[in-house]
Image (spheres, rainbow, N blue to C red):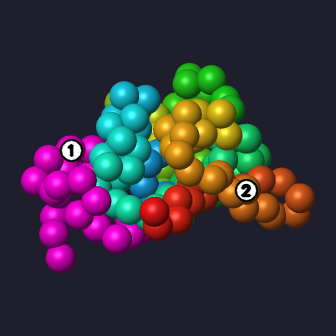
Amino acid sequence: HIAGNACDMKEFADTTFDLVHSNSVVEHVGGWNRAKQFASEVRRVADALFIQTPNFWFPIEPHYVMPFLHWLPRTTRETLMLRIPMGHKGRRAVSLDAAIAEVDDMPRLLDYRAYKLLFPDCQIVRERFCLLTKSFIAIRKPR
């Protein structure tokens, strides 16, 4: 077990690992630049990859279990955070300050084009639910 920062793994040489598996992590690392760092590092340290992320265009936001939430304007999301219990814990924000902070920290969901940009040397597989793409998996087989 190693605790660290997947956006900066300078302690590991290139292809230190046979496989990197990541399930719904890249959307949590921060903004676009952090997502690029994450993708670059996992591609560098591993020979093979299996990296999954939810699709921005799937109508249900998976972290808050709320239809269309990720497509709404910031102020609308903040208001909803105050009024409706959301997420797997079924909680709502206790103040406007907390709602704003929650929206600031929401995961950055990716679409196909952005995901392909992050993982250009990988096959991007579409994971489907009821004919809709719910997530993407970047797969790179061992070299």
Relative height, residue 117 to residue 88 (above, below): above
In reply to whether residue 14 is colored magenta, the answer given is yes
Give how far across and how far down residue 125 sits, in percent: 69, 57
- At label 2, counting other C-alpha atoms closer than 10 Å, the crowd grade (few under 14, some 14-19, many 20 or more) is some
Q: In which quarter of the image is residue 69?
A: top right
* Kind of residue sitting beneath label 2: Arg
Q: In which quarter of the image is the C terminus?
A: bottom left
Label 1 vs label 2: CA separation? 28 Å
Q: In which quarter of the image is the N terminus?
A: bottom left
Instruction: Give the residue displayed 53% in from the left and 46% down from the top.
Output: 121
Q: Is 141 or 71 nearer to us in this picture?
A: 141
Return the mark for residue 8.
Answer: 1
* Kind of residue sitting beneath label 1: Asp
Q: Of helix, strand and loop, which one carries label 2?
A: strand
Give how far across and how far down residue 42 sits, in percent: 35, 52
**Main SS of the magenta segment?**
loop
Q: Which of marks 1 and 2 is nearer the N terminus?
A: 1
- At label 1, counting other C-alpha atoms closer than 10 Å, the crowd grade (few under 14, some 14-19, many 20 or more) is some
Q: Of helix, strand and loop, which one carries label 1?
A: loop
Q: Bounds of the magenta span?
A: 1-21
Instruction: Give the residue displayed 52% in from the left and 59% down from the top.
Output: 140
Q: Can residue 29 be seen in this view?
A: no
In reply to whether residue 17 is colored magenta, the answer given is yes
Return the mark for residue 72.
Answer: none
Return the mark for residue 126.
Answer: 2
Q: How many labels does the image show?
A: 2
Q: Is residue 84 visible?
A: yes
